[in-house]
Image (cartoon, coloured by chain):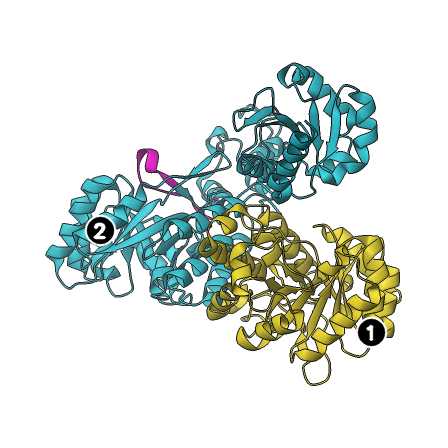
Chain colours: A cyan, B yellow
Amino acid sequence: MPVKASDIQKLLPEGGKKNCKECGLATCFAFAMKLANTGIALEKCPYLVPESKAELEEMLMAPIKQVVLGQGSRQVVLGEEEVIYRHQKTFLHPPAFAIQLTDEEGETVWAEKIAKVSWQFERLAKVSRIDLVVLRSSSSSGDKYLELVKWVMAATDAGLILAASDAETLLAAYEVSKSRDPLVCVTAENVEAVAPRLDPNAAVCARATSLESLPGLVEKLKDAGLERLVIDPGSLKLLDLVRDQTLIRRAALQHKFRAFGYPTAFFAVDATPDLSLQVLLAAAAVAKYAGIIVVEDISEDLFQVLATLRQDIYTDPRVPPTVESKVYTFNNADQEAVVLVTTDFALTYYAVAGEAENSKQPAYLLCQDTGGLCILAAWSTGKLVPETIAEMVNKEGMAEKVKLKQLIIPGLVARIKGDLEEELPDWEITVGPKEAKDLPGFLHELKKRREGAA
Amino acid sequence: MLEKFLDKYPGMIREFSFGANGNQVMLGGQNALPFHDFEGASGKPMFALEITDSKPADWAGALREIYADVEASPVAWAQKCATVYGADAVFLNLDSMEKDLSAAEIASGVKEVAGAISVPLIVHGLGDKEKDEAVLPQVAAACSGLGLLIGPVLKENYQAIAEAALEHGHSIIAQVPMDVNLAKDLNIKLGKFFPLERVVIDSLTSALGYGLEYSYSTTERIRLSAVVHDDKTLQTPLIARVGREVWKTKEALQNPQKGILWESVTALNLLLAGDDIIILRHPESLKLVRSLL
């Protein structure tokens, strides 16, 4: 819930009626408005009494704290979310995916898993990766765990998460990997031994076994001076995941419950040994607010599924994804190529482009600037009509590029054929299929017919 | 101490049932958001497998292999989905409407399928407003009393199809293009002569990577309006045609294993958003999603 400017004003000097202008704004209310939008620093007001200042700081604090993990190009930003439903406002920081290595697995498995951390999956011009590595102590040997930590530090620059239940093992690993700023997992069992011995600026994951016991664990960490927190309610089933993550998000945003005002973690790896089910749970966690999602292992297919979902859920709901409006070429388009028309709505474009490619036929694709509308919406708003198509054909000099002058329009706008023929008298206008998937077959038929005629 | 974070919701989804005597299924009755069992009744999703009444020439090769033994017979195909794969319902596409078949022939084909299975039948036309308007009322009449779920009913042709469904005891799928307000408008129109207890909404589905976020948010907003804002016109179950969309993506076509994951993840996310009836094509996806629930 956003802070009201009028509530802020009441805490400013003389009840917000001083209007000294020393902050650079005309009135205290204007200053309060800026504060509410986090557009100005509280310190700009020279007359704030300490009690009011503390109260205002509390009031203006982001309901979900930002936590940055990892370093350099591997940095991951979590938290700062402001809404429960994605249509209200974009979900801000996509969850980090983590893969787990255990000290008992041994170097062969470690190497296989670490190789996956350098995978790069590109879609809609964005690169997705596995962001973090969880180092889990499953043996009872502190030495084995340290060996794993050192091995991983040398093998990857990705951010690290330390998970060992034995306090001494965990602290030894923390000392060794401190330069990498690891996220240290702390539980109710080891918090007393571990928390006092961590740097105050250490990043800590509070791993509770239930939502109910999580606030107590968080308070203990805060009492130890630790503030860079990620919280894990220990959900193990789909229903618990939805309940825990929903209540955490709701408590933080709507009730300003500070113990839940942190990014969350979900360890799918602890829920089931089945990798496909881990990934399905992870998929639910992407939509349902998790900040860090941990799986035991992942295949390329499974990773692509999760990365695609993360991109989908974290797109801006108010701006349709678009591609650049221009002429794209496929299969070495030359004088013999046909000319296709579509819109710049990314999902439409990718469907058509993929099939144009699959068709193995040389083709140009005119991607019309429609502000990201699908075919029918673009047509009905006048952005994909005979005039706009003819304008693009002429502007791009398509008549000089091809011998055939065959222009293929989407089947969904078959009705514009006649008018387009009037706009482009030198061209043969052909109505293409309604669905992109039918494009290869359609182009193949067209070519056969052409060859038959010749 | 967590009680203070729990919400109570004013709205409830209408109880909905379809199917003939003995094979009826119940849906609806939710008074909480999806999977919010901690705040009320959150409902139990239903899974249907999709079949078609003519050779599925445009289906993915991997699917045609699975159904190769039954694809020539809609009756055998429907039975396999219900008994071998355990689908809660069968979703029959009337692709034969593209051919030179009379409405009467198509309708008697539907009746045969409905009579051959022990689960309810969902019957779906082409989405072509004239053709559907010509054929679906005849299907409704031929299958009188069998309690079908018939769709799609569009704002352009709802009158004729809904009237026939009403007369012969069927339920209908009100289909709108991804918009809360359009869904509301169509249900208001239907509500004037058709009981909303017998309507489910299809707000159109897109697959993971191909606009899933639009379906996700549209579905979520419809369910929020119904449950949180007590909008009576939207208090109906929601249906999502997941399989059809997923099995035309290049990911599914190139790699069937990936297709199963693609279908499962799309289905799961739409369930989280609020869909109640999920239409799938691959039986493995059905198994996978069910094993999680």
Q: Is residue B2 above or below residue A195?
A: below
Instruction: Decide if residue A63 is in sight here.
Output: no
Secondary structure state at the residue bearing disc 2: helix
Bin the neighbour count of mark 1 within 10 Å (Cα to Cα): few under 14, some 14-19, many 20 and up. some
Q: Is residue B218 above or below residue B48?
A: above
Residue placed furthest toward the left:
A143
Residue named by callout 1:
B142
Q: Which residues are magenta?
A: A62-76
Do callouts 2 and 1 mark residues in contact (Cβ within 8 Å)? no
Q: CA distance from mark 2 to mark 1?
A: 64 Å
Position of residue B23 in the picture relative to residue B186 (left or right): left
Bin the neighbour count of mark 2 within 10 Å (Cα to Cα): few under 14, some 14-19, many 20 and up. some
Instruction: Decide if residue B283 is in sight here.
Output: yes
Depth check, mark 2 against mark 1: the one in front is: 1
Identify the residue shown where x is 53% and y is 36%: A38
Q: Kindly identify which chain the residue marked by label 2 belongs to.
A: A
**Which dot marks residue A343?**
none
Residue A56 in the image: state x and y as whole percent.
50, 42
Q: Is residue A215 above or below residue A122?
A: below
Q: For this rendering, which residue is in front, A69 or A14?
A: A69
Q: Is residue B252 magenta?
A: no
Q: Kindly identify which chain the residue marked by label 1 belongs to.
A: B
Amino acid residing under circle 1: Ala
Disc 2 with disc 1 on a shared chain: no
Identify the residue shown where x is 73% and y is 80%: B20
Q: Quadrant of residue B52?
A: bottom right
Residue A216 in the image: state x and y as whole percent.
36, 63
Identify the residue shown where x is 69% and y is 20%: A393
Residue named by callout 2:
A110
Secondary structure state at the residue bearing disc 1: helix
